[in-house]
Image (tube, helix red, strand yellow):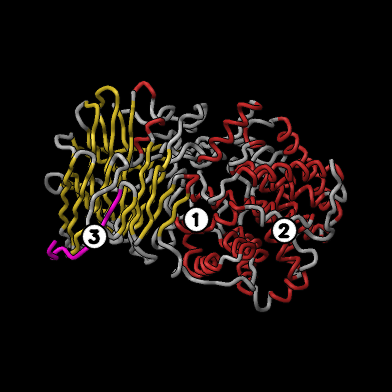
Amino acid sequence: MTETTVQTGPLLLAGREAELRQELHDARRPQLRRLLEECERLRGEVIPLEPPNPSVTYFGSASANLALAYRLTGQEHYLTELRRYLASAVSFPHWGKAHMPDHDLDAAWLLHGLSLAYSWAGDALPDDERTALRDKLILQGTRMYDFAVSTEGRWWSSSYWQNHNWICYAGLATAGYALRSEHPETLAWTERAKQNFDTVLSMLNEDGSNNEGVVYWRYGVPWIVTYLDVLKAVEGIDWFPRSAYLRETFWYRLHQAAPDLERIVNHGDCHDRRSGHSVAMYYKLAAEYRIPQAQWLAEKVAQEYFWREAYESGVRPGVRPEAYQELLWFDPSAPSTDLSDVPTSAFFPDLGLVVGRTSWEPDATLVSFKSAPGGGHKAWDTAHRIQDETGWITLNAGHHHPDSGTFVLLGKGSYLAIDEGYSSRKRTEHHNAILIDGQGFANEDRYHVFEGLGTERTAEMLTTTLDAGWVHGVSECSRMYDPDLGLERVRRHLVMSPAGTVVIVDDLAASAPRAWTWLLQTDNPALPDGPGRWIAPAGSGVLHVRTLGPEGSDDRVVRTGIQANPTSSTPGLEIENVQYTLQRETAPAKTARFVTVLKAAGWDEDLTLSATVTIDGDEFLVTVESAGRREQIALHLEDGNATLEQADVAQAGFAARTDDAAQER
């Protein structure tokens, strides 16, 4: 083990404390106010004297906030309140109760927060309290370290793409640095954490996407930054420049924002539709990578969206406890620029994620379409290679849904074609997907649907077009289903026009006749509006559906209940979310081709929508007329050239144009 050069002084404050205090009067005044307001809230909280069953992660962030407020302002009442929190946390025989006590998230959050408190305010504590805190940190850090060593190659110790890995190692490292001068054995903790994050940074994808979804991006990815921040402050090692993932991840988060920017696109395990913002994280990405839109979004969230998420979020401990990081990570020199020059569409190849919106306005239409193996391509391939070489299980993609080839559609301020959110037993039938003989993906109907699957079980986004306001993607996911079904093709062609019209052609084939079922998920039941026509109300918005084929399908709307326990700290908790599924099922056949047009409208908008399809072998021409506009989308399902004269955009297999519906052609 190599001895490292360690910066002495309070963690994250050494060498900058005087400047911070000065900036509290001007540049960081809003962040100071947030910190003190959070400390005032903590003052009114009832602290359990016995270890509670629910999560105790909040003890960590509470201690850090109170300690920083005391350190920077010198006001004694913050120290008094800090001692109250520390007394309970130190008295608990174990950190965490219901799920993996001492060895998982509860212990990690407390290790991080209480270690910062020890570094920032430890010298102000009475000797007996300081000693008790130090000894408790040594005990809990030892327990965490020993667990990491003993479980190497399984669960979070080596789960390089999983939030538990990042949180637990960041907590262990913070404790190790805080205790280094008094307990030299903690060098093993910090070196192990460094080795882990060295591996993590090399294995994360380069496009910044997150297979666990936006909520776990917001919950987990800031802990990578937390670790890099303390590493840089203590050892002078700056790993921010080497991380392509962190450099790009803001753009993933931005493009997974709903049109109102306040809510989210909820692919993956998402507790709700609001838990997605981290002001502190945006500040840090703006500071490290000089991303002006990240600084702008941080300011917008802080001023307009913060408190609604704070009160309505289903994720604990939530956004309020990040006050200490907001103050420390804010860089007054970081530029701030709005989104006016940001492209409205993007492609994230590792997750096979194509996303586009009609504008950056709140009433825009947004589509998000994805297709990739569990964990994304890099994690899937790398984890299988590691398992073949060492036997280690490094990919735990339990928050990644069986949702390849599926999409989410938002518009007019509403969720129109939805994702299920959080679920305990994940099923393809909960998504805007295809079932074959009533079956979804192989290995589904459990928490971790990708566990134990061979490397060949992949899905991909075959091609994409993002041009002139058009969004186009082609997914293929036949290998995600049971091989006994004999599938030859489960291919979805999805197009969104600059005006927000969505056209979907599903091209399906098997070696034997199969019943093919097309699924559309909505918050409220879709209502029939004539042959091949449906309307799904969704509050401020309404989804108009036109089904152009195949003829003779059995169409019905069913209630779909989804069970979930969104927190491992409360094993007995079970909730049910309800959505409604429009099912279109064919008689058994070797092939099927579904053609569908979707259009968002305001709840009180009198929308006239006509849609037709002309089919010539493998060439499809869909014509949509609405609001005086004619849109034509040409698709060649065998990757040939799509035929369309005077096209606005033309790529392999796709061409499209828009013009006045009254125009002579």
Real-space CA distance between mark 3 and mark 2, rounded to the nearest whole angstrom: 70 Å
Secondary element at tag 3: loop
Image quarter hosting the C terminus: bottom left
Residue 415 placement, left or right of 215: left
Secondary element at tag 2: helix
Residue at the far bottom in the pictured view: 26
Residue 574 - label: none
Q: What residue is drawn where x is 19% and y is 44%?
A: 547
Amino acid marked by disc 1 = Arg
Q: What residue is drawn where x is 79% and y is 52%?
A: 178
Ranked by sequence position, the earlier of labels 2 and 1 is 2
- Classify residue 93 by image quadrant: top right
Q: What residue is drawn where x is 82% and y is 49%?
A: 179
Q: Residues within 10 Å of mark 3 (few under 14, many from 20)?
A: few
Amino acid marked by disc 3 = Gln
Tag 2 and tag 1, C-beta contact below 8 Å: no
Which residue is disc 3 drawn over? Answer: 646
Residue 281 placement, left or right of 550: right
Q: Which residues are magenta?
A: 654-665
Q: Residues within 10 Å of mark 2 (few under 14, many from 20)?
A: many
Q: Is residue 146 magenta?
A: no
| Vertical side of 638 occupied by 42: above or below | below
Residue 82 - label: 2
Real-space CA distance between mark 2 and mark 1, rounded to the nearest whole angstrom: 34 Å
- Classify residue 75 by image quadrant: bottom right
Ranked by sequence position, the earlier of labels 1 and 3 is 1
Amino acid marked by disc 2 = Leu
Q: Give the percent coordinates (x, y) of residue 613.
A: 17, 47
Secondary element at tag 1: helix
